[in-house]
Amino acid sequence: MKKYLIIIGLVLFLANCQNNKQEAQASLEKARGFYEKAEYGSAKQVLDEIKTNYPKITDLQEERLHLMRLIELKEQERNLNYCDSMLMIFQNEASRFPKENPTASDDSQPLRIGVNEDGGMYIISSYTGATPLHHNQLKISLVSGEYVETEA
């Protein structure tokens, strides 16, 4: 009788392991589907669930890691393309500003122009010459006559 209970327990255990592996494989296929549709956030979420729920299925974990690296690569490529496009836009914007300051000497760089993470453009006045400028306002004008200025 004891033998039969051990055998039945072993069979149930193996059947449960097979079910877990099938469920894990189905989850991996779901993540691949999200990857193919470029839904990287959803794919990463499913892969995180696989990591948590099936940590001992090593071959599946290897496939999970491989897919995670592919997703990260695609995200980086997407981010690079976005940054390149934003760089082109803001370089065109920055080229509209005059590059000279008649009161600055050749060794100083009075204006620094940049773009923050939200895409907003900023200008910083940082004069490093020997004599003070005594300025309290910044005015930027275009060749067309349009201008913008800060408060005093």
Image: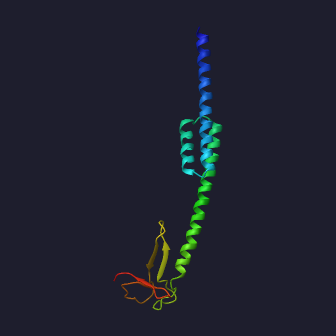
The N terminus sits in image quarter: top right
- Number of marks present in the image shown: 0
Query: Looking at the image, which is closer to me, 131 or 5?
Result: 5
Q: Quick check: 118 above or below 137?
A: above
- Residue 66 percent coordinates (x, y): 64, 47
Q: Residue furthest left?
A: 152
Q: Quadrant of residue 129?
A: bottom left
Q: Quick check: 12 above or below 60?
A: above
Query: Looking at the image, which is closer to me, 147 or 66?
Result: 147
Q: Quick check: 140 above or below 38?
A: below
Q: Residue furthest bottom?
A: 102
Is 128 left, or right, of 69 in this rendering? left
Which of the colour schemes (rainbow, by chain, secondary structure, one colour) is used?
A: rainbow
The C terminus sits in image quarter: bottom left
- Residue 26 percent coordinates (x, y): 61, 37
Query: Looking at the image, which is closer to me, 121 or 100?
Result: 121
Query: Looking at the image, which is closer to me, 57 or 30?
Result: 30
Residue at 59%, 47% in the rendered image: 34
Residue at 59%, 31% in the rendered image: 20
- Residue 72 percent coordinates (x, y): 60, 53
Residue at 59%, 23% in the rendered image: 13
- Residue 86 percent coordinates (x, y): 55, 69
Q: Quadrant of residue 124?
A: bottom left
